[in-house]
């Protein structure tokens, strides 16, 4: 018998033997939960700026019943909205944090596997967040894996002498761990769906464009990410220079390796507001984070060449993404025409034409709504349209699109179908008490009774079969499922606004417009 032995209800304590050693999980009804299993060595000292390395084997049985440490980070708040259910409560200290958590049914084998990459602006988030509980997936016959990855300066600062995109390399290492070990937890290593939200979704797009990840997963879900979200090396160098300046060091890997995690986290918090616009490129994150992937070619353009053409893709955004960055900090209702123009200028080579397009498409819109819509598409819409179109051009696999349109009543109804609001429905935890109330993303009202169940089952169905239940997306109809209290299939929603982000045919750059 191989090391991939699965011990189930015949043993009082569920124990699984992985390639690195045995782990003891926690039985919760018909689900077994394994927390804090290392997939790579602790990133300590100079190793924080090196590629992920295999974890040393351990003797005996490792306790996998309690949460472990996570990546160094600051607590993340968005104005008046408590985001701790989404990002966790900040930094839980400890070096051995490149870990996965696994939820699996008590019995069974050959099950679909879903691997989730959390969001948090490349600077926050962890497997400890209450929202990412995989119990509903396990209940429905899916093995759910969540993972921690390096964040901030250690994860994404582009430093001479260190590999780029170390946080993305961590995700690929976690996928390799899944490939090697998930059968022992009842999963099918040949049916893995990689999915992520926000920064995590942008990382998923980056993994789609990473040749070294080929064969490690079969499907992907991109929730409010961007296939155009990477920094150029010139933009990244500005952030690196600012970080080195804040720390009083030279911008080299060996110099950063001497700095403590506390100082790195503190320095990262002082990098907000760097102007990353260059003569040829806009800031794909419009100033909201100083960290992103750093690539010579945007993921959407790499996918357009045929990379990951064998991967089924489900991709979408929320209807009012941008309001999360305005409403909780009191900037939505006070928006002016100048704010709308500035949002366009930050993100588009022809801002006046862009604003006119949005005004025509939304003749009754307030300045706050126009500003939010342009910001949301600059951050997520344009890059999602680009990635969907690039992937759909290769018929070897299917592309599916969605728009999550259910409107939260939080903050007097102004948040609406904002960024991250779909997550409680995907994980089927929309009834968690901490997600409701005047300072919570879902607001005080109960959502439609079956919305979470249907959304969650759609994601699980896609993971099992590659078909979420509606027509594929192509460059003619652009079929999209609008998810609300009622589900409606629409063709090419928001066509005028989508086309306003198009690039000339054949144009390949890191600009912030989408392929024709």
Image (tube, rainbow, N blue to C red):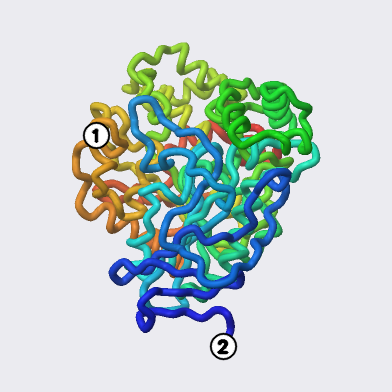
Q: Nearer the viewer, residue 97 or 422?
A: 97
In this rendering, position of residue 214 left or right of residue 61: right
Please say if 378 is above or below 480: above
In this rendering, position of residue 318 left or right of residue 217: left
Residue 4, given in percent of the width and then of the height, sits at 55, 79
- In this rendering, does residue 398 appear at all? no
| Disc marking residue 271 | none
| Disc marking residue 409 | 1
2 vs 1, front mark: 2
Residue 439, given in percent of the width and then of the height, sits at 28, 31
Graded by Cα atoms within 10 Å as few (under 14), some (14 to 19) or many (20 or more), the crowding at tag 2 reads few
In this rendering, position of residue 463 left or right of residue 41: left
x 70%, y 41%: residue = 295
Element type at marker 2? loop
Q: Quadrant of residue 233?
A: top right
Q: Are marks 2 and 1 in contact (CB under 8 Å)?
A: no
x 38%, y 21%: residue = 329
Graded by Cα atoms within 10 Å as few (under 14), some (14 to 19) or many (20 or more), the crowding at tag 1 reads many
Residue 469, given in percent of the width and then of the height, sits at 38, 62
In the rendered image, the residue lying farthest to the bottom is 1
Mark 2 — residue?
1
Q: Nearer the viewer, residue 463 or 171?
A: 171
What is the distance, in whole Å, between disc 2 and disc 1 at their CAs?
Answer: 55 Å
User: Which quadrant does the N terminus fall into?
Assistant: bottom right
């Amino acid at each position: 018998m191989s090391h991939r032995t699965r011990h189930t209800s015949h043993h009082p304590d569920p124990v699984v033997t992985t390639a690195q050693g045995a782990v003891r999980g926690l039985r919760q009804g018909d689900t077994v939960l394994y927390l804090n299993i290392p997939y790579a060595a602790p990133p300590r000292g100079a190793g924080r700026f090196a590629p992920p390395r295999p974890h040393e084997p351990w003797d005996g049985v490792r306790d996998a019943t309690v949460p472990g440490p996570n990546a160094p980070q600051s607590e993340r708040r968005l104005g008046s909205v408590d985001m701790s259910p989404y990002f966790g409560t900040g930094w839980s200290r400890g070096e051995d944090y490149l870990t996965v958590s696994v939820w699996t049914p008590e019995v069974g084998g050959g099950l679909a596997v879903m691997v989730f990459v959390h969001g948090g602006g490349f600077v926050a988030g962890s497997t400890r967040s209450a929202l990412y509980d995989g119990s509903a997936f396990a209940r429905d016959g899916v093995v759910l894996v969540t993972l921690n990855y390096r964040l901030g300066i250690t994860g994404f600062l582009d430093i001479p002498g260190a590999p780029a995109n170390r946080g993305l390399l961590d995700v690929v290492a976690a996928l390799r761990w899944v490939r090697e070990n998930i059968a022992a937890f009842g999963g099918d290593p040949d049916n893995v769906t990689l999915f992520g939200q926000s920064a995590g979704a942008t990382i998923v797009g980056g993994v789609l464009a990473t040749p070294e990840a080929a064969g490690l997963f079969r499907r992907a879900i991109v929730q409010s990410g961007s296939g155009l979200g990477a920094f150029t090396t010139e933009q990244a160098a500005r952030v690196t220079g600012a970080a080195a300046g804040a720390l009083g060091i030279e911008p080299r890997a060996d110099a950063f390796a001497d700095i403590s995690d506390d100082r790195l986290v503190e320095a990262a918090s002082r990098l907000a507001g760097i102007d990353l616009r260059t003569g040829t490129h806009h800031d794909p994150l419009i100033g909201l984070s100083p960290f992103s992937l750093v690539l010579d070619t945007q993921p959407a353009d790499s996918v357009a060449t045929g990379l990951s053409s064998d991967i089924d893709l489900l991709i979408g955004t929320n209807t009012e993404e941008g309001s999360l960055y305005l409403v909780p900090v009191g900037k939505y209702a006070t928006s002016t025409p100048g704010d709308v123009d500035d949002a366009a200028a930050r993100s588009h080579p022809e801002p006046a034409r862009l604003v006119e397009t949005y005004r025509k498409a939304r003749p009754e819109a307030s300045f706050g709504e126009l500003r939010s819509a342009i910001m949301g598409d600059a951050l997520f819409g344009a890059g999602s349209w680009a990635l969907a179109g690039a992937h759909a051009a290769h018929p070897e696999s299917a592309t599916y699109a969605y728009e999550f349109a259910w409107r939260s009543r939080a903050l007097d109804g102004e948040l609406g179908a904002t960024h991250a609001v779909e997550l409680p429905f995907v994980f089927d935890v929309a009834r968690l008490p901490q997600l409701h109330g005047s300072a919570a993303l879902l607001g005080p009202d109960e959502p439609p009774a079956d919305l979470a169940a249907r959304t969650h089952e759609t994601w699980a169905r896609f993971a099992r079969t590659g078909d979420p239940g509606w027509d594929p997306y192509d460059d003619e109809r652009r079929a999209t499922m609008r998810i609300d209290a009622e589900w409606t299939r629409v063709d090419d929603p928001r066509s005028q606004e989508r086309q306003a982000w198009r690039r000339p045919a054949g144009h390949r750059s890191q600009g912030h417009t989408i392929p024709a």
